[in-house]
């Protein structure tokens, strides 16, 4: 870890819905970058849209970040910071960097269509800048409150060196002056975000590439507010396995992954590496992923999120999990030996309880034909005389190989069915000592009787 306590990243969701896999990925990268550089990772709730923000989503966002282990080093809510925005807004007003507008959404839409129809960029033409105090007074008298735009400096070309996209250039004349405040006085995201990034000393803004043109405008806001802009990393978006931006991904949240039995570390391991030049690995700890985290490894092409890849990765990770890491989620009597016996057969930790029930019972063996019942009767007799302290499975099957003419599947399958009630499952050599002699004899005898 490079100690650099100046590094500050922030994850800034609007609590108008649950986190989905795309914004979980953004949160993760912000967290990893801060951890790698010994800095701070902040959760900033962009809850200026009071009508759509809900407390339940705030709670769910905190819970999901906690589940993933992405614990913030600090939290702030934009709804509690309007005094700060107000003060900066006043200062920008004094220097003429914000201005009043009255166009309705319908008028703006129509204007955009006209410009597009003429093959021109659909940029706001600043009609409102021509209004005089009389015009404003007339609007006020008619009960029309203004909304506010930030006035871009058309003479200051915008450029930054994006940590993922490289050198970026924007001509401010091709950007619309962004609306920053609604007629009801509420804030849109752009200006408060820049004010907060300055106030919270955010050094790195890591977000999706859908924000690239916002960044161009925000860079001028940082400058108008008298601050140097932070560094930016705009990530290529996430697409589904079919390679398209998918609506489905937008609805896949942590709940969905929890229900599937996905371990948080599996989601972290996948989202840390897809879209980068580094391989996705079945790690059980995030430390090596943090160690190698570098925006230079991120590609410009969309990152593909594939559920099947996640499930497979989860399975591999589960196979490597230590008993101590999962004990709290297992049936109490399973123990380390039980976990190790069944672990290789699991897709998810959830499945452990069901598989473990073939050790503890009760089990339901299938009906056997007469010949197999006789074989199982022999097995029961021999099971009574083998050494249970050693390797009872090999002792029992070895004895049966000699005393019967069965071999292969004919030898093994009826024993597995009689002893576990299933046709397949964990290695019998690991399972039989856990079933133990008393239960094993009882099950073999019961199966022999049919
Ligand atoms: N609230 C914004 C969003 O969710 C934040 C974007 C940003 O990271 O600045 O899109």
Image (spheres, helix red, strand yellow):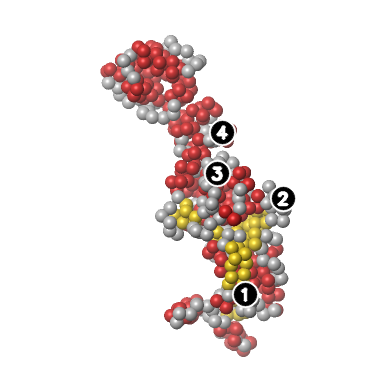
Instruction: Find residue 3 and name its label.
Output: 2
Q: Tag 1's secondary structure?
A: loop
* Residue at the image position 62 percent from the left and 72 percent from the top: 158
Q: Nearer the observer, disc 3 or disc 1?
A: 1
* Cβ at disc 2 under 8 Å from ligand 1: no
Mark 3, Cα crowd under 10 Å, few <14 / some 14-19 / many 20+, is many
Closer to viewer: mark 2 or mark 3: 2
First of labels 3, 1 by sequence position: 1
Q: Quadrant of residue 197?
A: bottom right
Q: Position of residue 112 (x, y in %)?
A: 48, 78
Q: In terms of secondary structure, where does tag 2 sit?
A: loop
- The residues tagged by marks 2 and 3 sit, at their Cα atoms, a distance apart of 25 Å
Q: Residue at x 59, y 63 (%)?
A: 166
Could you tell whether 226 is left or right of 179 in the image? right
| Mark pair 2, 1: CA separation | 35 Å
Q: Which residue is mark 4?
A: 322
Instruction: In the rendered view, tell whether residue 78 sits above or below residue 370.
Output: below
Task: Please report contact status of discs 2 and 1: CB closer than 8 Å, yes or no.
Answer: no
SS at badge 4: loop
Q: Residue at x 58, y 50 (%)?
A: 65
Q: Residues within 10 Å of mark 1 (few under 14, many from 20)?
A: few
Residue 77 in view (yes/no): no
Say whether residue 359 is left or right of residue 51: left
In this view, the residue in front, 176 or 328, is: 176
Q: Nearer the viewer, mark 4 or mark 1?
A: 1
Numbered disc in front, either 4 or 2: 2
For the residues marked 3 and 4, what is the alpha-carbon distance in whole angstroms?
14 Å
List the residue tagged with mark 1: 157
Q: Which residue is mark 3?
A: 265
In the picture, the disc for residue 194 is none
The reply to whether callout 4 and callout 1 are in contact (CB within 8 Å) is no
């Amino acid at each position: 870890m490079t100690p650099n306590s100046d590094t500050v990243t922030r994850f800034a969701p609007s609590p108008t819905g649950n986190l989905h896999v795309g914004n979980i990925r953004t949160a993760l990268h912000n967290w990893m970058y801060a951890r790698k550089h010994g800095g701070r990772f902040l959760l900033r709730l962009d809850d200026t849209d009071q009508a759509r923000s809900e407390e339940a989503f705030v709670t769910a966002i905190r819970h999901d970040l906690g589940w993933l282990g992405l614990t913030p080093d600090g939290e702030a809510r934009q709804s509690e910071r309007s005094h700060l925005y107000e003060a900066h807004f006043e200062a920008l007003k004094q220097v003429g960097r914000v201005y009043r507008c009255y166009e309705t959404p319908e008028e703006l839409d129509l204007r955009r269509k006209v410009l597009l129809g003429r093959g021109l960029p659909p940029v706001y033409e600043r009609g409102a800048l021509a209004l005089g105090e009389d015009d404003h007074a007339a609007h006020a008298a008619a009960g029309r409150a203004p909304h506010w735009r930030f006035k871009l400096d058309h003479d200051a070309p915008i450029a930054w060196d994006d940590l993922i996209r490289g050198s970026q250039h924007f001509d401010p004349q091709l950007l619309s002056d962004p609306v920053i405040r609604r007629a009801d006085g509420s804030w849109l995201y752009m200006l408060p975000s820049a004010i907060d990034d300055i106030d919270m000393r955010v050094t790195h803004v890591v977000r999706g590439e859908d924000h690239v043109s916002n960044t161009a405008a925000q860079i001028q806001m940082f400058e108008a507010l008298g601050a140097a802009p932070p560094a930016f990393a705009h990530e290529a978006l996430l697409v589904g396995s079919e390679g398209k931006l998918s609506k489905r991904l937008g609805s896949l949240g942590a709940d969905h992954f929890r229900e599937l039995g996905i371990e948080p570390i599996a989601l972290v391991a996948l989202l840390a590496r897809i879209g980068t030049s580094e391989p996705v690995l079945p790690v059980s700890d995030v430390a090596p992923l943090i160690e190698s985290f570098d925006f230079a490894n991120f590609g410009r092409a969309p990152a593909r999120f594939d559920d099947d890849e996640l499930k497979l990765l989860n399975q591999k990770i589960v196979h490597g999990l230590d008993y101590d890491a999962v004990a709290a989620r297992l049936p109490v009597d399973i123990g380390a030996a039980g976990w190790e016996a069944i672990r290789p057969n699991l897709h998810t930790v959830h499945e452990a309880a069901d598989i473990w029930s073939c050790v503890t019972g009760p089990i339901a063996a299938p009906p056997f034909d007469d010949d197999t019942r006789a074989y199982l009767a022999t097995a029961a007799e021999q099971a009574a005389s083998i050494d249970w302290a050693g390797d009872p499975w090999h002792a029992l099957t070895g004895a049966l190989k000699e005393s019967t003419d069965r071999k292969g599947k004919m030898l093994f399958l009826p024993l597995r069915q009689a002893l576990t009630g299933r046709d397949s499952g964990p290695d019998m050599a690991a399972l039989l000592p856990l079933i133990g002699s008393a239960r094993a004899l009882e099950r073999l005898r019961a199966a022999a009787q049919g």
